[in-house]
Every structure is written in C-alpha cells, then in structure tokens.
Image: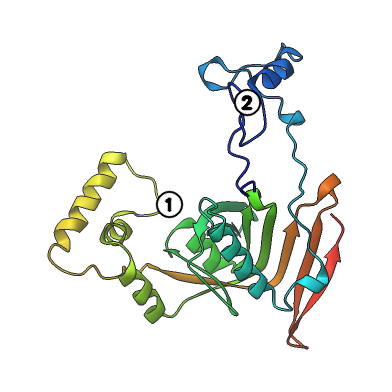
Amino acid sequence: MQPLLRRGCLLCPGFCPTCGRRGSDVAARSAAYPGEVDHTPAGRPAPDLAALREEYTLGGLAESDVDPDPLVMLRRWVDDAVAAQIAEPTAMVLSTVDATGRVASRTVLLKGLDERGVVFFSHYTSRKGEELAGQPQCAVHLGWYALERQVRLEGRAERLPESESDAYFASRPRGSQLGAWASPQSTVVEGREALEARYAEAEARFAGGDVPRPPYWGGVRVVPDRVELWQGRPSRMHDRLRYSWSPTQHAWALERLAP
C-alpha cells in the first residue's frame, strides 16, 4: 500500500518512486522553454510552474459523513495528520489586520483544541498580538497537502486566563522559556549577536531557579463562527463544506460551496 506522504520531491535526477517523476521529463519541459531563467540550485533546469499540477484522488467529503460540530471534525483531521506523520501537523497560518486594513499572515502552532476553539501562544506585544488587541477578528488556515485537505476558520481572538498561560508556560522546555524573555518579538534588533546577548542575560537572571512566564506572553484562543472543510477531488471538483454559527439557534448550519 502506498503511503499517504507521496509527494516528497519536485525534481529528481532519475526516477523517484515517491513523486513518480523523472529528471528527463523535467529536462524536456525546460527545453520547450529555452528563455526561462534558471533559479534552481546546481544548474538544474527551472520547472515550468504553470505545468505543475496534481489530481486529487484520496477521498471525498459528504454531508452525511461529517459531525454536526466542525471543531470535532477539525480534531479528527488533526489526528489523521499526526497518524500519517505529516510534517508539522499542528502548524496553522494566522491572518490579522491592522488599523489601516493591512493584512499580515504568519505560522503559529496549534496548542489546544476543544469545543471553544483553537489555541496558540505568543507574545502579546508582537505584531500579531497588537493587531489582535486592536481588531480581534482574524482567520486561521490549516493545510495537510499530502492528505489533500485544508481547513479555514474565521472568528474572534480572546486571551486565555493567566492560569492557563502559566500552566502551559511551565510545561515548555527551559530553553523556550528563556527565549520568551530574550526575544522582543517583532521589533528591530541590531543583529544575531544582540539576541544571543539577551538570551545569555536571561540565563544568568534565572540561573538555578524556575523561569516564570513573562507578563507579555500568553495564550490566545480563536473562537470561530465560520469553519470550512476542503477535500481535494479529481478534475478540480473539490468538496467544500462550510459551517456557520447561528447565535440565535445556538447551532451550526452546514452548507456546500461550489469549488
């Protein structure tokens, strides 16, 4: 049985059983476009990006197969990604907006998931923290491309109680705890040496004792009111199921969207 993680390579010198491509195929495509600039390492031919495509064939997503609660479905899909040994299965892209309407995205790690929403931890004084304080509406995206799945969440961010942030911070490796004190996240620094010096200062400050949680560091929960499940299908006829929360009915409504 072929493993789910079957897209390991983009360019291969010979035949690769993981991606099913031959280096000669890539060379032939490159020869058809002699004017392309080679930006690949070691003199490899630049791939024709417009010609790269995959057929999605791993499964489908029917309304009858999903749970009425999208966060239950999200938990199932996260568990599937962990079981399939997907790299960074808890990585999620958080998008925020500032007062001028400028949108910023970055990857954070999913550290909690229950019926209330998804949780991550960060500096409250970072760009993301300040933007969420000013505009708590945000979006989260999780993608497991080897499984041909992705999930989108839209909702409102709220800070965790300090007791929950304290408990998680105490469970972190000591080096990560010190890093939270050493890094003035999202601010301009003079160089790597300045960061290393700040880390050394934190090491000396807390030598021989526990490292407390910085007051500017903690957890954030994104409470979604809209969740979309996406499953790739052949011929780009993908399955898209969207849940929308109804505050009057206190229930999720499920709809199918055109791909």
Of residues 258 and 59, which is closer to you in this image? 59
Q: Quadrant of residue 10?
A: top right
Tell me if 189 is positioned left or right of 249 in this view: left
- Report how far apart the C-alphas of labels 2 and 1 lie in the structure: 44 Å
Residue 115 at x, y percent in the picture:
60, 80
Which of the numbered marks, if any, corresponds to residue 89? none
Where does the image place residue 1, in percent across and percent down from the top left? 64, 48
Residue at 49% across / 62% down in the picture?
Answer: 130
121 or 41, which lies in front?
Answer: 41
Give the left or right position of residue 90, taking residue 50 as reference.
left
2 versus 219 height, above or below: above
- Determine whether, in the image, residue 196 is placed left or right of residue 81: left
Amino acid at pointer 1:
Ser
Give neighbour class at mark 1: few <14, some 14-19, many 20+ (Cα, 10 Å): few
Element on which disc 2 rests:
loop
Q: Amino acid at mark 2?
A: Phe
Asked if residue 224 shows in the view, the reply is: no
Question: Can you identify the residue that label 1 sits on?
Answer: 186
Residue 203, quarter of picture: bottom left
Q: Where is residue 53 shown, x and y percent of the image?
A: 75, 36
* Quarter that holds the C terminus: bottom right
Q: Which residue is mark 2?
A: 15
Residue that protrudes farthest toward the front in the picture = 1
Q: Where's residue 139, x and y in %? A: 64, 62
* Residue with the most extreme bottom position: 249
Quarter of the image where one finds residue 12:
top right
Q: Is residue 241 visible?
A: yes
Give the answer, above or below, for where 212 lies relative to 40: below
Q: How many marks?
A: 2
Which-is-in-front pick, marks 2 and 1? 2
Relative horizontal placement of residue 209, taking residue 157 as reference (left or right): left
